[in-house]
Image (cartoon, rainbow, N blue to C red):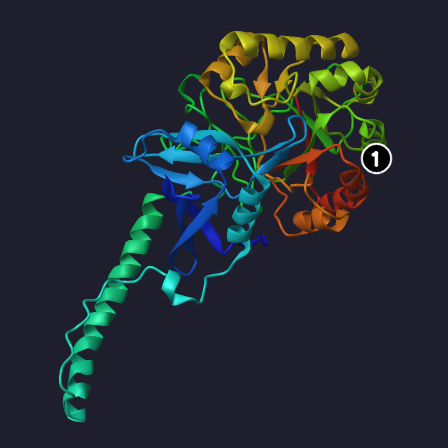
Amino acid sequence: MPLLEQDSALMIELLALEPMQDSYQMEVGLTHSGGFTRKVLLIDEYTYLQVNSILGSYQEHRVRLSIYPKWDPFRRKYFSSLTKMNRTCSETLYFACSEDFVSQLLELKQQTMPSDEANTVQAVVPVPEPEQPQPPKRRASAFRVTRPIVTRCMLFSLLFVLFFLRMDDTLLNSAEAHEDFTSPVDSSVPVPYVPVVHTASFQSAQAEAVPETEQEPAPVQSAEPEVQNPTVEEMELDGSRYEYSLPKGYVALSFDDGPSKYTKEIVDILMAYGIAANFLFIGQNAQQHPEAVQYANAHGMPVGSHSWDHSDMTKNSSGENHNNLLRSVQVLEQNIGRPVTVFRPPYGAINGSLAAEAVKQNLKVLLWNRDPEDWKAQTSEQIIQYFYHTDPSGGIYLLHEKAITVKALPAIIEYLKKKQLKFAIFK
């Protein structure tokens, strides 16, 4: 059984959003392992306007707030997301937010079930009118009558919680990772039937690898000489769905947001251990560091597109996405001398329009199911500990080209090799 990190606040639901006289108020419900609690957050005007602009009417929806905000180094802003859902569909929407709002979310994520009963939702019990003191025997009798009623209330509450968990079987998973509220049986997502916004971003350590299919993907017989390592297997992506995970016994490393000054060092470490990984490059960065793109390709590392500018492409028009993908692919192909076939959308955010454009440009979508959040780690040990406390079998890991990740990489590879896993790369 893998050791998984546990968040005491398993889900944050938006209950109300309203302006006050001197502030803005967001009421949320926290579903814990121990119960349900209401909290009121005082948020800034900037965050309020951002959330209010995308929220619209939500009386017939449940609205779940992500507890995994992310810093965008290109636009120098924090972003978070919310998911509107009803019984038939879901829609994930992104919004910019303030650092103060991010701090409040992280506090909610880290706190345990509060002991302050004033904040805890309890059954509303009518307060009796003052009455004359009763003899001790009479009070004891009242207590005996009341106790079975309390017991029934507790049992009813337990049944309600179990019913709620049954209705929302994704409660214990990250709100943004591979959710499909319309197709619980088939975990693959056909491109024509994707939700309005389907994301795999901000995956928490709670997520557990689940193979997208019971049938193991067949290895591709590549004519290229660099994929001859028995510990590395090249797999061809299925263009009709988004790839989130691998069969058991496999693991994959992938690096986003390059190329950078760390690309060559990362490639050298991978080569020293006899493995390979996918590199998802941003077009603008590739234009500035063409030698890094060429170096990765020359050493057998599959190169894919991570868009031209790392923008949220679900907010773009079809024409903008066409140009964005085309520019990125063109600059990469100029440096590797062969077609680019793999695409990872920024933030893992993708909708039907973007998926259709990717298909037109012969790009297959690669997402992930393991996110160590190395972009915000303070030490390399924090990144390494994530690997130690998650089951790596079947995992596609999301990493970034950062100095702290480079430092952690040898220990990560050694740990994965001890698990006797085969490393996968995608085309």
Image quadrant containing the C terminus: top right
Q: How many marks are shown on the rendered structure?
A: 1
Q: Is residue 230 above or below residue 321?
A: below
Query: Who is closer to the viewer here, 269 or 125?
Result: 125
Image quadrant containing the N terminus: bottom right
Question: Residue 42: image x %, image y %?
Answer: 46, 47
Q: Is residue 189 above or below residue 372?
A: above
Q: Is residue 323 above or below residue 367?
A: above
Label 1: which residue? 269
For mark 1, does the 10 Å Cα neighbourhood hold few (<14), some (14 to 19), or many (20 or more) residues? some
Kindly indicate the quadrant of the structure image that contains residue 234: top right
Question: Residue 347: image x %, image y %?
Answer: 58, 29
Can residue 366 be spotted in the picture? Answer: no
Give the left or right position of residue 120, taking residue 45 as reference.
left
Kindly indicate the quadrant of the structure image that contains residue 276: top right
Q: Amino acid at mark 1?
A: Ile
Query: Who is closer to the viewer here, 303 or 247?
Result: 303
Can residue 242 be spotted in the picture? Answer: yes
Question: Residue 191: image x %, image y %?
Answer: 46, 18
| Picture residue at 35% right of the left edge, 34% below the top | 85
Give the left or right position of residue 49, taking residue 374 as reference.
left
Question: Residue 221: image x %, image y %?
Answer: 68, 18
| Picture residue at 75% right of the left edge, 48% below the top | 379
Q: Secondary structure at mark 1?
A: helix
| Picture residue at 64% right of the left edge, 26% below the top | 75
